[in-house]
């Protein structure tokens, strides 16, 4: 217990010294450690976000579109670096990860759900930035299919699915974030 208090005090002093000196303090972390801030996965076409519906901690709930609220932790996600541009995506409220239904679907149209984080390939997501259009594309690391809004619905409560990438189709707008 005493060592823990001493370690925290040392860490605070180190941080305070770095900030006072105008420097930056960097620490290395394991590749799969939680990093980054809680953020929204916001659909470009509607401004709605990916959110876990109530009851927020139930395993296997399909992620849906919803309006964003500052205190709506069910609509906040953390991208946890696995490697390169591959991440697991954890929900702030439930602390479960984005996955495909049954955890191993290769089928276009399969629901995107939350399941307990377990480091399986179906819980990896590749985030790619399109620098020309200033958008993000997210695809499942296991299936290669794109994160999309079901049937291209622009209203709240539309389910998220994995779907074939449609870059030259009017439904493409439902696959960009």
Image: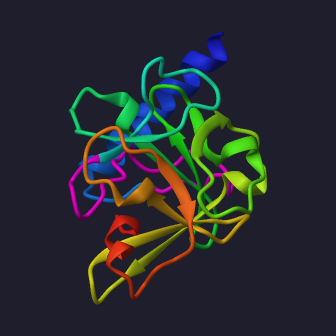
Q: Nearer the viewer, residue 10 or 159?
A: 159
The reply, left or right, for residue 128 in relation to residue 81 is: left
Write the start and end of the magenta stretch as one range.
26-48
Helix, strand or loop: magenta stretch: loop
Q: Nearer the viewer, residue 27 or 65?
A: 65
Task: Verify whether residue 37 appears in magenta.
Answer: yes
Q: Quadrant of residue 113?
A: top right
Residue at coordinates 46% horizontally, 80% vertically from top-left? 166
The reply, left or right, for residue 163 in relation to residue 9 is: right
Task: Verify whether residue 128 appears in magenta.
Answer: no
x%, y% of residue 75? 36, 37
x%, y% of residue 143? 71, 66
Residue 89 in sight here: yes
Q: Quadrant of residue 136?
A: bottom left
Query: Does residue 61 lie above or below 23 as drawn?
Result: above
The reply, left or right, for residue 121 in relation to residue 13 is: right
Q: Quadrant of the N terminus?
A: top right
Query: Does residue 54 lie above or below 91 as drawn?
Result: above
x%, y% of residue 99? 64, 47
Query: Does residue 42 lie above or below 102 as drawn?
Result: below
Q: Residue furthest top?
A: 1
Residue at coordinates 43% horizontally, 20% vertically from top-left? 54
Q: Residue furthest front?
A: 151
x%, y% of residue 7? 57, 27
């Amino acid at each position: 217990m005493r060592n823990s208090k001493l370690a925290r005090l040392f860490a605070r002093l180190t941080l305070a010294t770095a900030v006072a000196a105008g420097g930056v303090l960097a620490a290395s972390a394991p590749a799969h450690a939680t990093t980054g801030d809680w953020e929204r996965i916001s659909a470009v076409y509607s401004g709605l976000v990916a959110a876990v519906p109530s009851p927020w901690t139930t395993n296997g709930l399909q992620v849906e579109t919803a309006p964003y609220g500052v205190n709506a932790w069910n609509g906040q996600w953390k991208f946890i670096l696995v490697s390169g541009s591959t991440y697991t995506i954890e929900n702030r409220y439930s602390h479960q990860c984005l996955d495909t239904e049954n955890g191993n679907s290769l089928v276009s149209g399969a629901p995107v759900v939350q399941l307990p984080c377990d480091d399986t390939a179906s819980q990896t997501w590749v985030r790619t930035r399109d620098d020309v259009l200033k958008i993000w594309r997210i695809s499942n690391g296991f299936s290669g299919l794109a994160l999309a809004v079901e049937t291209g619905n622009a209203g709240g409560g539309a389910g998220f699915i994995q779907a074939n990438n449609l870059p030259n189709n009017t439904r493409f707008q439902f696959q960009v974030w």
